[in-house]
Amino acid sequence: KGLPAAFKKMPFSLIMADVPCSGSGTWAMTPERLFFFEPASLEHFTARQKHICNHALKALRKGSGFLYITCSVFHAENGDMVTYLRSQAGLRLLRSGLLKGYDDRADNLFAAAFILE
């Protein structure tokens, strides 16, 4: 389990984690997906996001960048994950925010840029 041996020998200077999420940032373009959304599924997504980030961070060199991305507008998948990553993973937040695409007839996404200290 964990990272393949090749990754353990080669720490990365930047990792971008575009994690699986609820997809709520796409619902303006696909409103039918809201009908099928189960609020309880957020726990599944956040647990998976934490798992992915925890494994990815094992391959990140200290002092390097980590970019966390979702296409979600839910605080549980965005703001709460920023809090988790800052407190549990030793990351320093550089900048985060929701990129609103609906004004341009596009999807919304959330991004947070960190440095591993």
Image (tube, rainbow, N blue to C red):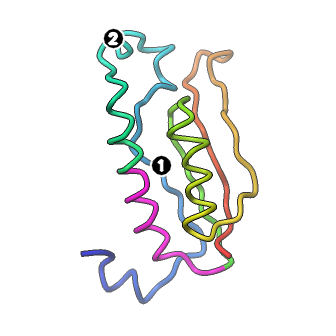
Q: Is 102 rendered above or below residue 23?
A: above
Q: Report how far apart the C-alphas of labels 2 and 1 lie in the structure.
A: 24 Å
Q: Which residues are magenta?
A: 48-62
Q: Residue furthest left?
A: 1
Residue 44 relative to residue 13: left or right: left
Among numbered discs 2 and 1, the one appearing first in the sequence:
1
Q: What x and y, as percent, mark residue 87?
A: 61, 63
Q: Report which residue position mark 1 lands on.
A: 18
Q: Would you say residue 23 sits in the magenta stretch?
A: no
On-image quarter of the C terminus: bottom right
Q: Toward which corner of the image does residue 65 lie, by quadrant? A: bottom right
Front disc: 2 or 1: 2
Q: Amino acid at mark 1?
A: Asp
Relative height, residue 76 to residue 106 (above, below): below
The residue type indicated by label 2 comes to Phe
How packed mark 1 is, by other alpha carbons closer than 10 Å (few <14, some 14-19, many 20 or more), is some
Q: Which residue is mark 2?
A: 35
**Residue at the image position 62 percent from the left and 44 percent from the top:** 111
